[in-house]
Image: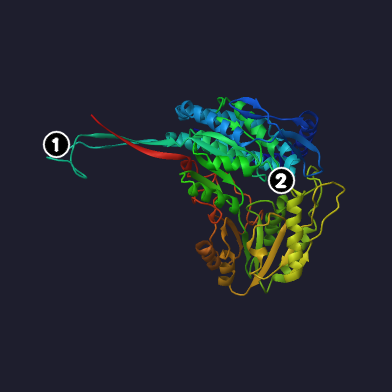
């Protein structure tokens, strides 16, 4: 088996002096998507067949309102149909050898690799990411499929054999540890059944592919619902379905439905034929699903990532330029709409003014506007509701703290919701420190002693990512020992809290950011979709 290698598309183009070629490929793909794909009526797919509902959902680009397409507003009955189909397909799919499933996903990865620029262009138009963010996300989806295929193959489908040796001693009756004949034992890893996959808008290719691959490659079948309500990303979800089908996915194994989560997602949680849910989104929704299943007396597997309120600490002797650059990237990339985005900074009070000055200098270089343009770093917010959250947070800051930079709506000449990256100064007790906002607002607070910074960093219900900038080994050691977060970075100039790489960093949430303590892109992820069975045979 060849050693796993990440895609790193932009890095490869850049290092080989072909950045202009990279840009042309992306821009040509945008034109192709506009010319050949956008504006159509798109079906759902259940059991490999096109399904149309009585009502439609109209999806427009957050960039400028361009019509992306008309999709189906599925109902509970459609979900029930998809669940029945997935249940019927489970037997034959789960009985396939792990090698067959591995080969299918390697084939899907290769298909996505060949059309990564077109898929990235769809992604940018659909949720407002820059070309760099979109290509990076498509790369991550390819990485997930290849990495998980490698893991299944390396672990031989997660089944293993052992034995108990025979004994010549004889006993009158059996008991724990009694001698007996040889036992040949197989510890088999078996899929649960049907998984509902509920995907977020902000990483609709990589997270959707990662969760779906996790369920499917281990032998489960799937009912997949992309984000379909206020924050719509249904076209990228459809492309995932099409790629899996092209790779050889049998009918009924992966079903694509669209519609409101309050109805479709609720049915997946409440339906007793669904064995598990994989979900990425808000803590309120995630905890609500677990609670509902428990109240209904249903035993379901939940593989859930529930966001974050991610801190960075800038110590007294930190390299301030590196800290400003890393925190700016982490806080404002994709307009702060990442669960790993840095939204809190605790900076030593002796360097606060210098740090804020350098951070503002960096923000002034960030161009706001159409993310399809090469020079733009910050694109639109995903929806009018996100804009209202931004405005409300700024108004709250004006009442109880200070707006140090930004805070205004930006007129770009486009119809989308464009805002300035904002830096606010509030007390640690303020709601802006504790609530996940998903907008480009960074809250700053100060500290005098390092213990105080750590205490504040940990004093939220989330525990997803965290960053530190310090030159002192003692502080680094203390940070690594005490920080309550699943993904931790120290002195990282590229980004303080974002940018986990498949196979290098596991992406895992602690506390209110996750349930299982096992992360994506790691050797433990797939085991969450499997149950063990011990089989002993005596001959």
Depth check: 493 or 172 in front? 172
Seen in the image, is 173 located left or right of residue 434? left
Seen in the image, is 515 located left or right of residue 7? left
Residue 140 placement (x, y as % from top left): 62, 41
Residue that label 2 marks: 230
Residue 211 placement (x, y as % from top left): 56, 40
Seen in the image, is 326 located left or right of residue 163? right
Dot 2 falls on a residue whose secondary structure is loop
Q: Which of the marked residues, 2 or 1, is nearer the chain's N terminus?
A: 1
Q: Which dot, 2 or 1, sits closer to the camera?
A: 2
Location of residue 424 with respect to 234 vertically, above or below: below
| Residue 317 visible, this angle | yes
Mark 2 to mark 1 CA distance (whole Å): 70 Å
Residue 245 placement (x, y as % from top left): 61, 26
Location of residue 102 with respect to 373 vertically, above or below: above
| Residue 505 visible, this angle | no
User: Picture quarter containing residue 13?
Assistant: top right
User: Which quadrant would the C terminus be assigned to in this image?
Assistant: top left
Q: Residues within 10 Å of mark 2 (few under 14, many from 20)?
A: some
Depth check: 315 or 83 in front? 83
Residue that label 1 marks: 168
Taking the spot 70% from the left edge, 54% from the top edge, the residue there is 336
Taking the spot 61% from the left edge, 49% from the top edge, the residue there is 281
Disc number placed over residue 57 in the picture, else none: none
Residue 127 placement (x, y as % from top left): 73, 43
């Amino acid at each position: 088996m060849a050693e796993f290698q990440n895609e790193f598309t932009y890095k490869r183009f850049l290092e080989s002096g072909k950045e202009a070629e990279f840009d042309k490929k992306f821009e040509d793909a945008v034109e192709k998507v506009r010319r050949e794909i956008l504006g159509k009526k798109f079906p759902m797919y259940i059991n490999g067949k096109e399904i149309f509902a009585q009502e439609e959902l109209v999806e427009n680009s957050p960039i400028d309102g361009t019509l992306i397409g008309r999709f189906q507003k599925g109902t509970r009955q459609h979900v029930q149909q998809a669940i029945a189909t997935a249940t019927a397909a489970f037997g034959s799919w789960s009985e396939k050898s792990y090698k067959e499933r591995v080969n299918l996903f390697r084939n899907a990865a290769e298909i996505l690799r060949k059309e990564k620029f077109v898929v990235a262009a769809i992604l940018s138009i659909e949720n407002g990411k820059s070309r760099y963010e979109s290509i990076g996300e498509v790369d991550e989806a390819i990485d997930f499929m290849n990495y998980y295929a490698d893991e299944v193959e390396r672990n031989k489908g997660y089944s293993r054999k052992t034995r108990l040796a025979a004994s010549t001693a004889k006993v009158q009756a059996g008991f724990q540890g009694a001698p007996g004949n040889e036992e040949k034992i197989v510890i088999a890893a078996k899929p649960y059944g049907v998984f509902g996959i509920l995907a977020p808008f902000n990483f609709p290719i990589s997270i959707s592919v990662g969760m779906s691959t996790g369920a499917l490659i281990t032998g489960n079948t799937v009912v997949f619902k992309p984000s379909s309500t206020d924050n719509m990303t249904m076209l990228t979800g459809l492309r995932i379905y099409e790629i899996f089908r092209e790779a050889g996915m049998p009918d009924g194994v992966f079903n694509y439905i669209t519609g409101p989560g309050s109805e479709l997602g609720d049915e997946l949680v409440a339906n007793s034929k669904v064995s598990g849910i994989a979900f990425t989104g808000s803590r309120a929704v995630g905890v609500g699903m677990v609670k509902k299943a428990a109240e209904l007396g249903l035993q379901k597997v939940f593989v859930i990532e529930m966001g974050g309120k991610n801190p960075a600490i800038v110590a007294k002797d930190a390299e301030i330029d590196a800290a400003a650059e890393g925190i700016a990237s982490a806080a404002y990339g994709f307009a702060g709409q990442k669960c790993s985005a840095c939204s809190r900074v605790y900076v030593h009070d002796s360097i606060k003014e210098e740090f804020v000055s350098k951070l503002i200098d960096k923000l002034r270089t960030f161009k706001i506007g159409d993310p399809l343009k090469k020079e733009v770093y910050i694109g639109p917010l995903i929806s009018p509701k996100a804009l209202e959250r931004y405005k409300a947070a700024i108004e709250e800051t004006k009442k109880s703290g200070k707006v140090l930079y930004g805070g205004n709506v930006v007129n770009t000449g486009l119809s989308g919701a464009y805002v300035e990256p904002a830096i606010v100064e509030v007390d640690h007790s303020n709601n802006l420190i504790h609530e996940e906002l998903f907008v480009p607002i960074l809250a700053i607070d100060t500290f005098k002693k390092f213990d105080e910074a750590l205490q504040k960093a940990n004093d939220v219900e989330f525990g997803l990512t965290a960053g530190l900038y310090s030159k002192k080994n003692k502080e680094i050691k203390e940070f690594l020992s005490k920080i309550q977060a699943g993904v931790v970075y120290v002195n990282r100039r590229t980004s303080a809290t974002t940018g986990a790489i498949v196979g290098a960093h596991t992406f895992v949430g602690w506390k209110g950011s996750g349930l299982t303590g096992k992360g994506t892109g790691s050797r433990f992820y797939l085991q969450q979709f499997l149950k063990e069975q011990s089989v002993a045979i005596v001959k």
